[in-house]
Structures are given as C-alpha cells and as structure tokens.
Image (tube, rainbow, N blue to C red):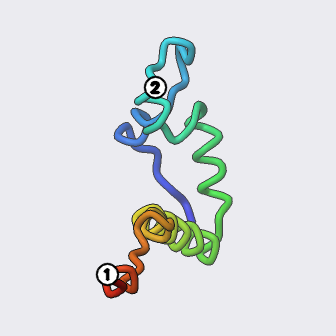
Amino acid sequence: MVFNETASEIKYFIENDRSKASYFQWLTSKGTNYTCYMKYLNGLNEEEIMNNKIEQFRTAINSITAPFSMPFFILDFDCFYHS
C-alpha cells in the first residue's frame, strides 16, 4: 500500500532542534524522521496495517480499564455487612 506524503502529518515529527522540543511535543510526536516513517508505512502489507490499528485500539482500551483493575478500586462489599 502506498501512503501519500501530506503536510498535515509532518507537524507530528520533531526533525529540527530536537533539544528545544517541549515535553508535550515529545509526547505527541510520531518520531524524529518523517522520511523513515514513510518508508516504514509503505513497507507494510494490508495485514500489518490492520494489526497496527487493532493494537492502537487495544492500547486505548487497556489504558482506560487498567486503573480499575488495581486493588484500590476493587470494593469488597462483605466488609459492609459485618458488624
């Protein structure tokens, strides 16, 4: 699959002055080299593209549900019934 280069994607890469990039820019960046990223995307087949999308969805769901699996959020209702 061939991905077209778009100017809207370039803004997510920190190619120049990496030392001056803010913490938030590093968190939201896709990397430091746009050309390398395009080569990677163009080298993927359909199955790998679908696996990447599924992995992104899985990561989002896990980041939402993981805090609720901690013992702090698990309520033991038996403690309310003991006098």
Label 2 near label 1: C-beta < 8 Å?
Answer: no
Give the mark toward the camera: 1 or 2.
1
Question: 33 or 19, which is in the foreground?
Answer: 19
Above or below, 76 relative to 67: below
| Mark 2 residue crowding within 10 angstroms, few (<14) / some (14–19) / many (20+) | few
- Image quadrant occupied by the C terminus: bottom left
Which residue matches tag 1?
80
At 56% across and 13% down in the image, what residue appears?
19
Give the x, y percent position of residue 10: 44, 35
User: What's the amino acid at mark 2?
Assistant: Tyr
Give the x, y percent position of residue 74: 43, 73
| Mark 1 residue crowding within 10 angstroms, few (<14) / some (14–19) / many (20+) | few
- Image quadrant occupied by the N terminus: bottom right
At 32% across and 87% down in the image, what residue appears?
81
Which residue matches tag 2?
23
Horizontal side of 64 relative to 54 (left or right) equals left
Question: 22 or 68, which is in the foreground?
Answer: 68
Give the x, y percent position of residue 75: 39, 76
Q: Identify the image quadrant of residue 67.
A: bottom left
User: What's the amino acid at mark 1?
Assistant: Phe
Seen as rendered, the residue at the extreme front is 83
Compute the Cα span from label 1 to label 2.
45 Å
Q: Is mark 2 on a helix, strand or loop?
A: helix
